[in-house]
Amino acid sequence: MPYPHVLLSAAVSLDGYLDDTGPERLLLSSPADFDRVDEVRASVDAILVGAGTIRADNPRLLVNSAGRRAARVAEGRAEYPLKVTVSGSGDLDPAANFWHTGGEKLVYTTDAGAERATALLGDTADVVPLGPVLDWRALLAHLHDGRGVRRLMVEGGGTVHTQLLQQGLADELQLVLAPLLVGDPAAPRLFGPGAYQGGRLRLTGSRRIEDVVLMRYEPTAPGTGPLDTAADRHWLRTACELAALCPPSETAFSVGAVVVAADGTELARGHSREGGDPVMHAEEAALTKLDPADPRLPGATVYSSLEPCAHRASRPVPCAGLILAAGVRRVVTAWREPDTFVTAADGSGVLAAGGVEVVTVPEYAALAQLPNAHLPH
Ligand SMILES: NC(=O)c1ccc[n+]([C@@H]2O[C@H](COP(=O)([O-])OP(=O)(O)OC[C@H]3O[C@@H](n4cnc5c(N)ncnc54)[C@H](OP(=O)(O)O)[C@@H]3O)[C@@H](O)[C@H]2O)c1
């Protein structure tokens, strides 16, 4: 299911708080950083905050720069990004600034909350019930498919950020660290307790902006079940991009593969015909770089742009067999093998029969097919 790119944006104090407990919103960013946030807002299709932030801060969530709004319009986009909130209760103050500024507004809620939200808001906002409980994947799929949102900026609060990160749905975190301390345990924190990815996130950039520091992170740890996560999609995209490195061939697919440990550490990568070996497959190229006794292999995920092969004339063991022998228990792939060279190859079936969780992410199939466009269908 395609989702928008989800960017979590927040500012925190040195002791990790989003706010204090006073009646006024605590200003954590510097003026130049507020302008950077304005620029990010201008770049996205939608901005989301939880109902708690509307209650606590009464934000407008606008693009303040007239120049940036004009540029959006010149590109054929709405002047303001769509404003989105989530509320289980539907208990939303119709006088809040959120509803009376900017462009279109959308409320995601539960079946029960929808009745209350509609009664309170009338036609000020579209109210979308998502069932008895609010499911974030359903919300993101609806934003993508129903509202055409490709980039979503999430501006808090902590309850919302925590769920999106814990559920593996955040593609990126833009975090500003402000040089002040709150020191009140009753104040809201950026991330609450619960299960997060193990290991370290990837730091993709950092920058001083007046007296605050902006840090950008991406989650790295593979998902653990049948659903793909933002980190899975990152690694699968890497595998697809590796396929572009393959020496061209008329008789074999160009494929890329990455092996990633449970904590998000990249263990190995490979691509077809690597090292000048005309029959080398991508998964094989990656796995042969690893010690078969590496204790991280059973918890690792293999990302392959094309599903691992199930039959092979050129070697005694196909890639599905190599993965099973390595003890890997999860494979994420973009593209099921077509009948180009082998009829009804079913590497995914072989892996599943061997107890491997195989996750196919068809939205990356076109990228995986790109270096194979010259092959007969
Ligand atoms: N420093 C920053 O960058 C920043 C940015 C934003 C906010 N903040 C601060 O964050 C604080 C607010 O954070 P918060 O955690 O209290 O609130 P929040 O995350 O903004 O919103 C939480 C509310 O959203 C709804 N919600 C969230 N997940 C839901 C789910 N799975 N199912 C149903 N409803 C769901 C619920 O609304 P209902 O109660 O209506 O059911 C819930 O009470 C404020 O103090 C604000 O100043 C700081």
Image (tube, rainbow, N blue to C red):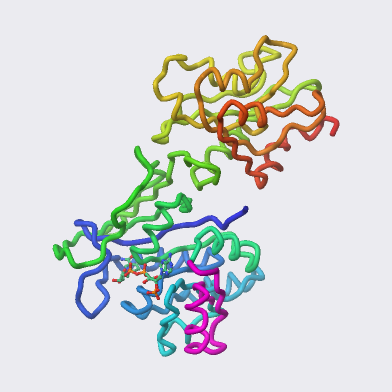
Q: Quadrant of residue 356?
A: top right
Across and down, in percent, residue 190 comes to 30, 59
Residue extending furthest toward the left: 183
Relative height, residue 214 to residue 262 (above, below): below
Q: Which quadrant would the C terminus be assigned to in this image? A: top right
Relative height, residue 11 to residue 235 (above, below): below
Q: Quadrant of residue 197?
A: top left
Across and down, in percent, residue 35 comes to 39, 67
Magenta region, residue range: 106-133
Relative height, residue 349 to residue 18 (above, below): above
Camera-nearest residue between 98 and 296: 296
Q: Residue at point 39% right, 47% down?
A: 217
Q: Quadrant of ligand 1?
A: bottom left
Q: Number of labelled discs?
A: 0
Q: Residue at point 51% right, 83% down?
A: 115
Camera-nearest residue between 287 and 135: 135
Across and down, in percent, residue 201 comes to 38, 42
Camera-nearest residue between 141 and 272: 141
Relative height, residue 109 to residue 312 (above, below): below
Q: Residue at point 50% right, 22% down?
A: 327
Horizontal relation, residue 191 to residue 88: left or right: left
